[in-house]
Amino acid sequence: MSTMNTSSTKLGNPGLFSKILYYVLLIVGALVSVFPFYWMFVIATNDRGAVFNIPPLLTIGDQFFNNFERVLEKSDFFQALGNSLFVSSMVTISVVFFCTLAGYAFAKYEFPLKNILFVCVIATLFVPTQLSVLPTYIIMAKLHWIDTYRALIVPAMVNAFGIFWMRQYISTSVHSELIEAGRIDGAGHFRVFWNIAIPVITPAMATLGILNFMNVWNDFFWPLVVLKNKEHYTIQIALQQLFSNRDGLDYGMIMSATFTATIPLLIVFLFFSRYFIAGLTSGAIKS
């Protein structure tokens, strides 16, 4: 018995060591990922010269509200924050809905020129974004949408990546037998999509929503092109205004604004990731 216990202990040690190493690497990776946010907050809570300290300053100061007060003096920060929340939310909702519909159609329906149309959709991914700026701007100008939220929302209501992502996920996750069973029960096409497909593909929709919200929130170039009125500025343009300072860059002010602008992104990510994990768990239990 003692020999068996000794051998099992020896066999267990490599597994225990690999498990400890695994968690150590996870902790180190988490700390490396979180450190930029922590350092940004440290600079946001100290005076403007703290960013030049050698060695780098790692202690939280008490100047955050003073720095943020200067942000409010130089820009309509909360107005821009609300504009970005509105635009990002509207675009994300439309992208998730329309891309899911299109992906479902490409994955589960047969219609003329289906494969050719899908190839055309994928081909748009190879077109640089900069090439579409001028024709899109001309269209917005002819529609008299320049300096309106419609110029930010309508061109981004659907995208090729979202269609490709949802099509690939639906083709492997939504079984054709479930769709046929719904049709036999008398459900229409949209009811089958809403009651059968949507509960299964919630993880993919949550992932697409997170990625798209972050992409629209961080977009700077297109809002800068089409927005003229300061009341319509998004948060990225408002942050850019803080860099125009005759007395030099006030990094404490800039970091306080940047940190505050990051909070909605973190909230959205945590909210949708919870549903994402729940969807994966329920799918694993059902299967």
Image: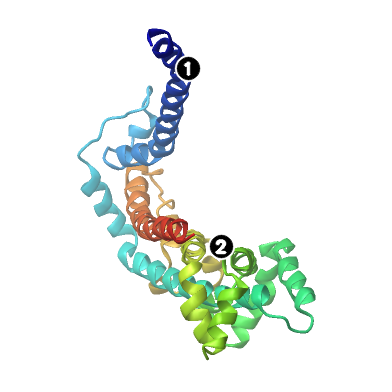
**As shown in the figure, which amino acid type bears the numbered disc 1?**
Leu
The tag on residue 221 is 2
Query: Above or below — where is 45 with respect to 102?
Result: above
Residue that sits furthest to the front in the current view: 1
Q: Is residue 57 left or right of residue 96?
A: left
Of marks 1 and 2, the one in the foreground = 1
- Residue drawn at 27 percent across, 37 percent down: 46
Q: In the image, which disc is placed on residue 11?
A: 1
Crowding at label 2, few (<14), some or many (≥20) Cα neighbours within 10 Å?
few
Dot label at residue 282: none
Q: Residue at x 38, y 11 (%)?
A: 1
The quarter of the picture where residue 171 lies is bottom right
Please say if 164 is above or below 146.
Answer: above
Does 83 appear above or below 28?
A: below
Q: Quadrant of residue 162?
A: bottom right
- Nearest the viewer among 3 and 245 is 3
Residue occupying image coordinates x 43% and y 13%: 4
**Residue 90 point in image, percent of width and height:** 44, 75
Mark 1 is surrounded, within 10 Å at the Cα level, by few (under 14), some (14 to 19) or many (20 or more) other residues, namely: few
